[in-house]
Amino acid sequence: MCGIVGYVGDKDCASLLVEGLRKLEYRGYDSAGLAVETSAGKVGVVRAVGKLANLDAALAKTPLSGKTGIGHTRWATHGRPSEANAHPHVAGNVAVVHNGIIENHVELRRGLEAAGVKFTSDTDTEIVAHLVHEEMGKKQGDFASSVRRALARLRGAYAIAIVCGDVPETILVAKNASPLVIGIGDGEMMAASDIPALLAHTRDVIFLEDGEMAVLEKKSATLSTLDGKPITRAPKRIDWSPAQAEKGGFKHFMLKEIFEQPRAIEDTLRGRIDVTAGEIVEEEIGVTATLAKKIARVYFVACGTSSHAAIAGRYWVEQLARIPATVEIGSEVRTREPVFGPGDLVVAVSQSGETADTLAAVRTAKAMGAHILAVANVLDSAIPRASDGALYTHAGPEIGVASTKCFTAQLAALLMLAVHLGRARGALSKEEARRILDALLAVPHAMRDALEEAEHVKNLARKYARARDMLFLGRGTGFPIALEGALKLKEISYIHAEGYAAGEMKHGPIALIDEEMPVVVVAPRDAHYEKTMSNLHEVRAREAQVIAVVSEGDKDVVGVDAIRVPVVEPEVLPLVTVIPLQLLSYFIADIKGTDVDQPRNLAKTVTVE
Ligand code: AGP
């Protein structure tokens, strides 16, 4: 997730573009840059690593003056945060900013290098600049048709803005699976990844759809499909306040991020799965097949929400790769005298990549000869840097302190890892792998269905918002989801909540159950269904009110507040069953009026012991 902006009009645009980027900093902030047409036929570029203040400083040293330009604030996916990897990327007179992931970047890059192109960055985006430059050089048709031919060679997700010195006072924008909105001004046009960047200039916008492009000039926005068919679309008027606009119309970042999960999963899976072969693309996963065959034990380390993803990861690695696996919270690894050695694959799971306890565990394990794989959301953060390999989730920046989309992206990444290990070691057949990978690719759709229950969950939240304690139960991979449901509730609503393995209830927590203790049971139709149902009945028998997360069509669960989730393959259930629990916590917290995005005493990144 990155932020892009563009302007063409009569104003000097550098500072205007930077202001637009400032409104998009929530989308990425590891580097930023501008490309501005400074004189006829000339495009000047200024870029800087770090937050926008650094770009301001760079522009103070090297001012860019001109009335047509594009800008970018980056959240790295390919290539570490550095000035060379910052956008815009340039080839000849063409400058490009991009938000998304180009799936076939490796083969395109090889082709361009073979033709003599010299790359100056590690990004997938630079390829786009070279392809457009190459097509412009053929002088077949106009700017738009050159870009069309270039884009036809790409697979993946993009929102792109391009300026070309040979085509003054023009910006070309295109979109496939990443957002792009055009702002219609009076004698000026803008483009941006999101509405907040436009609101200072106009409230009349046109949303570009997937497979569409537009040529922006001062007084016109000419829309067409990527295969050249003209489109007519009237602008829409946006009446959101600036604060609402920043959150995409949602009341809180957390709610926005809950709803962003289908996209986060799509981006995390993008370009990594070969369903026909029943394989994961090895270069994307951070563990080679050769190494996979040598692993004697997988040891997950993580904290908080990430440790819940790790528990699901453990279950999958054991089931699909038949490797002994264990999970430990980071702080305990540094407290004990653990034994690691060659043959151990230590998987450090951390959305921030900076958590001090997880980092310390990584260093301990590495010093003892284990191979370390980081599963992180922030490229080039401390944990991936201290590791031997990295498997990045592509959830984009998460602003809400309570993790949601990063958690499900971690689940997707860990399931891919388990499939990869299973295939490499011959423990998982091609047919089984295909079944699971197909199911994984269908998760975004299932998540969208699960999110449609939001209104129903909100009504339940009204009923349960006054609870003092709550218990969450689940079995199999439903267990980490019960833990996560309880953690979300306590983090943001300050209601005391515990997550338990459903089978463990009778070993203690059952003593707490009465009519004052609502119990949330994760009970989808899986291999554990009947046993979980027995637990549910034990709870009901003690007068507790039950909220049950059940599979669509399940008519056997009666006398409870049921929340239905779509029927999916058992391996991907946790990615779907967690959604109603995230929503329940969110709505309860909102009813209680707590600070949902910044709950008391919590920090997004915990860099202290
Ligand atoms: C999640 O909602 C929490 N804020 C917290 O438990 C978090 O998961 C934990 O601090 C670990 O963070 P990490 O994933 O960045 O390592």
Image: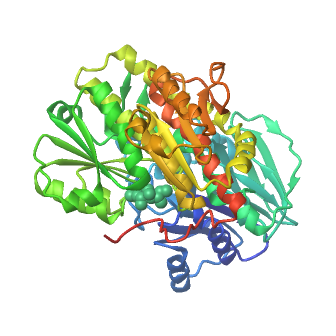
Quarter of the image that includes the C terminus = bottom left
Q: Residue at x 66, y 32 (%)?
A: 560
| Horizontal and vertical percent position of residue 249 | 75, 57
| Horizontal and vertical percent position of residue 167 | 68, 57
Q: Is residue 271 visible?
A: no
Query: How many marks are shown on the rendered structure?
Result: 0
Establish if 99 lies above or below 447.
Answer: below
Q: Nearer the viewer, residue 586 or 1?
A: 586
Place residue 527 in its image quadrant: top left
Q: Nearer the viewer, residue 520 or 359?
A: 520
Place residue 304 in its image quadrant: bottom left
| Horizontal and vertical percent position of residue 483 | 45, 46
Asked if residue 605 lies left or right of residue 143, the reply is: left
Establish if 227 lies above or below 607.
Answer: above
Q: Residue at x 51, y 52 (%)?
A: 497
Q: Residue at x 41, y 44 (%)?
A: 309
Establish if 305 lies above or below 282.
Answer: below
Q: Is residue 116 visible?
A: yes
Q: Nearer the viewer, residue 96 or 86?
A: 86
Quarter of the image that includes the N terminus = bottom right
| Horizontal and vertical percent position of residue 222 | 80, 48
- Where is ligand 1, by quadrant? bottom left
Q: Nearer the viewer, residue 386 or 221?
A: 386
